[in-house]
Image (cartoon, grey):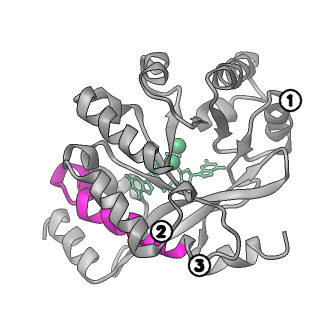
């Protein structure tokens, strides 16, 4: 059986689930939101990482219905959380090429009755590589609704600085490769400082990804990073674990 068919069946049979990983705001020490991360609970293979199936879902176009499912689920869950924190959803470049991603986002928000300001969309440079005019128009339309737009995995692609100028992102996510190197390579610290300074002057916030140690956290605080995300704060958790993390904080 083809993986495409497998994905199709998985979507129909509700084998997908969302995990949620918090962002910690360094100025308040409170959880500022959660990133929704899709998981495939395969009947035979167990939990399959998106790293293994998102590329195939992109090649086959299955990422369009799957991505729509993720958006709807994420908005639906967030609307029920005991605090009005943000929910971040990863969007694939393929979802932009499908043409009606903005309508899909608007429908998901409306259906969940979620304040658009609580939704953040994480996009990679790949989104801006394609047909700029229409992509930028879509991003501006979404931003006009109050939806936040974040640049994911910043620093891993090329021409990153040009992309920052092409669109007014609300936030830059500093790729975990730089965070991992913080304790071992002085140049990683220099890069993180440069990115936070740049973001600051462009009116954008920063989230450092993949923070695993107190030492990395100390460097990031010192560099003026807005938020951190990573195993040090919390691994991605099941949906039931979100509300308890928000209660009493
Ligand atoms: O959660 P995990 O580390 O397994 O994620 C691996 C990769 O899959 C990350 O790059 C992440 O951005 C991506 N990913 C996770 N969930 C989604 C999703 O819902 N849509 C898309 N397009 N990518 C996702
Ligand atoms: O590309 P994106 O940033 O969306 O990827 C998110 C992925 O990063 C998730 O699959 C998650 O499992 C993984 N991740 C989250 N925190 C950490 C961390 O502290 N260390 C490492 N190595 N991976 C992490
Ligand atoms: Mn992401
Ligand atoms: Na990322």
Residue, disc 1? 222
| Residue at the farthest front position | 144
Residue, disc 3? 80
The residue located at (50%, 49%) in the rendering is 146
Disc 2 or 3, which lies upstream in sequence? 2
Magenta stretch: includes residue 239: no
Q: How crowded is mark 2: few (under 14 residues within 10 Å), some or many (20 or more)?
A: many
Magenta stretch: includes residue 57: yes
Q: Where is residue 84 in the image (x, y as percent from the top left)?
A: 66, 66
Which quadrant is the C terminus positioned in? bottom right
- Position of 28 with respect to 234 (left or right) is right
Work out whether residue 28 or residue 7 is closer to the camera in this orientation and state it.
28
User: Residue 75 got which mark?
Assistant: 2
The residue located at (30%, 64%) in the rendering is 66
Q: How far apart are marks 2 and 1 (CA)?
A: 33 Å
Q: How crowded is mark 3: few (under 14 residues within 10 Å), some or many (20 or more)?
A: few
Q: Distance between the residues labelled 2 and 3?
A: 9 Å
Q: What element carries label 3?
A: loop
The residue located at (43%, 60%) in the rendering is 49
Disc 2 or 1, which lies upstream in sequence? 2
Q: Give the range drawn in magenta.
A: 56-77
- Does the rendering let one see residue 100? yes
Q: Where is residue 212 in the image (x, y as percent from the top left)?
A: 74, 47
Mark 1–mark 3 CB contact (< 8 Å): no
Q: What element carries label 2?
A: helix
């Amino acid at each position: 059986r083809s993986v495409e068919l497998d994905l199709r069946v998985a979507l129909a049979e509700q084998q997908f689930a969302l995990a949620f990983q918090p962002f910690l705001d360094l100025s308040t020490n409170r959880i500022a939101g959660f990133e929704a991360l899709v998981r495939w609970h395969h009947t035979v293979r167990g939990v399959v990482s998106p790293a293994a199936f998102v590329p195939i879902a992109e090649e086959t176009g299955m990422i369009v219905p799957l991505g729509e499912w993720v958006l709807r689920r994420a908005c639906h869950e967030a609307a029920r959380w005991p605090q009005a924190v943000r929910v971040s959803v990863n969007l694939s470049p393929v979802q932009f090429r499908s043409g009606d991603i903005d309508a899909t986002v608007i429908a998901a928000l409306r259906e969940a009755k979620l304040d658009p300001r609580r939704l953040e969309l994480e996009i990679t440079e790949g989104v801006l590589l394609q047909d700029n005019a229409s992509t930028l128009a879509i991003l501006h339309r979404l931003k006009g609704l109050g939806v936040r737009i974040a640049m994911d995995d910043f620093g891993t692609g090329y021409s990153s600085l040009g992309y920052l100028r092409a669109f007014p992102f609300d936030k830059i996510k500093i790729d975990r490769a730089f965070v991992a190197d913080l304790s071992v390579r002085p140049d990683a610290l220099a890069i993180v400082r440069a990115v936070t300074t740049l973001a600051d002057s462009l009116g954008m916030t920063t989230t450092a990804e993949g923070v695993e140690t107190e030492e990395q956290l100390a460097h990031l605080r010192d560099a003026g990073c807005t938020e951190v995300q990573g195993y040090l704060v919390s691994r991605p958790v099941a949906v039931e674990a979100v509300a308890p993390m928000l209660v009493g904080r």
